[in-house]
Amino acid sequence: MNAARRAGFVGAAVAVALVAGCSGGPTPTPSATSPQVVAGWRRLPDPAPGARVRAAVEIGGGRTLVAGSVPSGDGRTPAAWTTTNGQQWQRISTRPVTPYGSLADLVMAARDGDRVAAFGQAYGGAHSNPRPTTWTLDLTAATPAFAEHEQSFTLFGGEDAIGVTALSARPAGRFLLTGDWTARTGRYGAAVWTSRDGVTWTRRADAAGLASAPGEQTTARGAAAGPGRFVVVGSALGSGVPPSQPLTWTSPDGVSWRRHALPVPESLKQDGAVASAASCDAVGCLVAGWSQGSAQRPIRWTVDQGGHPTRPAAVGPPAGLTQATTIQRVGPSAYVLETVDHVLRLEEIPGTGATARSVPLPVRSRQGALGVVAGRLLLAATDGLWLRDGPVSGGATGGASG
């Protein structure tokens, strides 16, 4: 595998959302008499010593799951917990069956009813590439546990692999992984993996409308599920204007896809843009990304259920090297987590779709994820968990621009 493709694969997989159930009795985690509060965020006790939380999601019944890994010997091992208040945690057991499964972080997952499909990764091998692992969880089991399912090495890896980027679930038993692959044409491009049970996966690297056409290279960076369809977001790199075209793809089943171009403001067309994260509700989806070029700007799009834009793109001011990673909805607002020059930044977008507002963060961190605990916004940063304890405050960061 050449150096460029190794680098693309190493940097591809990122976390989006992790879902699970609980087992056994609650394990209280002591909290300080006066919890630390910074910039309107309250520090939560760690689920376990050395816990590294990669993502969080509500799982029903007032419960939230956080998942990632804990220290084990000279490395780490997968771990997950549930909570109703961020103060007490219930450990969920994991059942790895492969050597890399025993070392994995649970970095992505999605829930469909009582079943959870999860994706883990551990770095290793001759090139220290991320080694993928797949997991499922039955929430109805007497003792729920994440069980690993061994896959063929060439399903997600090998000489044709570029990377895996996001995991989503649509009601009626369909799971979807997105990423990039070398198709039969020999062109790199967007690809998906589909599964009905989270155990057996089928790769689709040549899907019409999704794979790269002659003269371009598509890439899939994010995924979400709306009513009756999946939404994948990414871009196509070509020689036209814009040179990088932000895209959405929609599909009812993960097999057949329709492609839609997202609008790029005239002032940014010479550089182009990328879409990288999405969140959908019953009306449509919010899509987040950034402009290309030396002065990158955050961009937000709203699209309807069919993936078509419903208003001009909202563009923020120049921000540095920008990448949107996660969108979390809390009540009427959506929160976009991104990195700017490799440091986390958070924005709130009110339900009206008005100008985004900057939300101060309690710590400076390079990596993080969002969730909801007891109706409040949860931040999982590299140095711990924080719950939004006060009202959002901060300045405007961008408005609508055509």
Image (cartoon, rainbow, N blue to C red):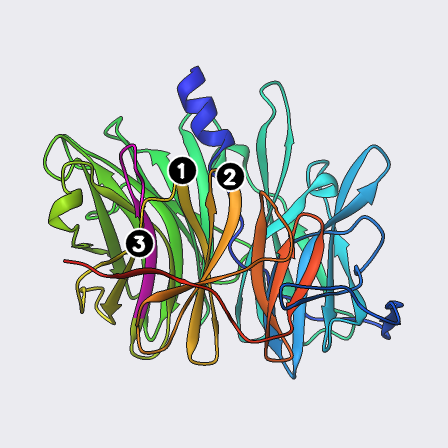
Query: Does 110 sit left or right of 333 as displayed?
Result: right
Residue 305 seen in this snapshot: yes
Query: What residue sits right under mark 3 in the picture?
Result: 316
Q: Position of residue 381 (x, y in %)?
A: 64, 52
Total labels: the figure holds 3
Q: Residue, x 48% and y 46% (percent of image)?
A: 339
- Disc 1 marks which residue? 321
Q: Position of residue 76 (x, y in %)?
A: 77, 41
* Relative horizontal placement of residue 58, taking residue 335 as reference (left or right): right
Q: Earlier in the sequence, mark 3 or mark 2?
A: 3
Q: CA distance from mark 3 to mark 2?
A: 18 Å
Badge 2 crowding class, 10 Å Cα cut-off, few under 14, some 14 to 19, many 20 or more, is some
Q: Crowding near pointer 1: few (<14 within 10 Å), some, many (20+)?
A: some
Image quadrant in which the C terminus is located: bottom left
Find the distance from the CA under tag 2 to the CA under tag 1.
Answer: 7 Å
Q: Residue furthest top?
A: 2
The percent coordinates of residue 219 (x first, y second) are 31, 40
Q: Residue at x 25, y 72 (%)?
A: 305
Q: Tell me which amino acid carries mark 3.
A: Gly
SS of the residue under disc 1? loop
Of mark 3 and mark 1, the one earlier in the sequence is 3
Magenta-drawn stretch contains 31: no
Magenta residue check for 287:
yes
Query: In the rendered structure, are the residues bearing label 2 and label 1 in contact, judged by CB atoms less than 8 Å apart?
Result: yes
Q: Residue at horizontal 47%, vertical 55%? A: 167
The residue pinned by badge 2 equals 342
Q: Neighbour class for label 3 at 10 Å: few (<14), some, many (≥20)?
A: many
Identify which residue, 242 or 232, lies in the foreground. 242
Left or right placement of residue 346 versus residue 106 in this view? left
Q: Is residue 132 above or below residue 48?
A: above
Name which residue type carries label 1.
Leu
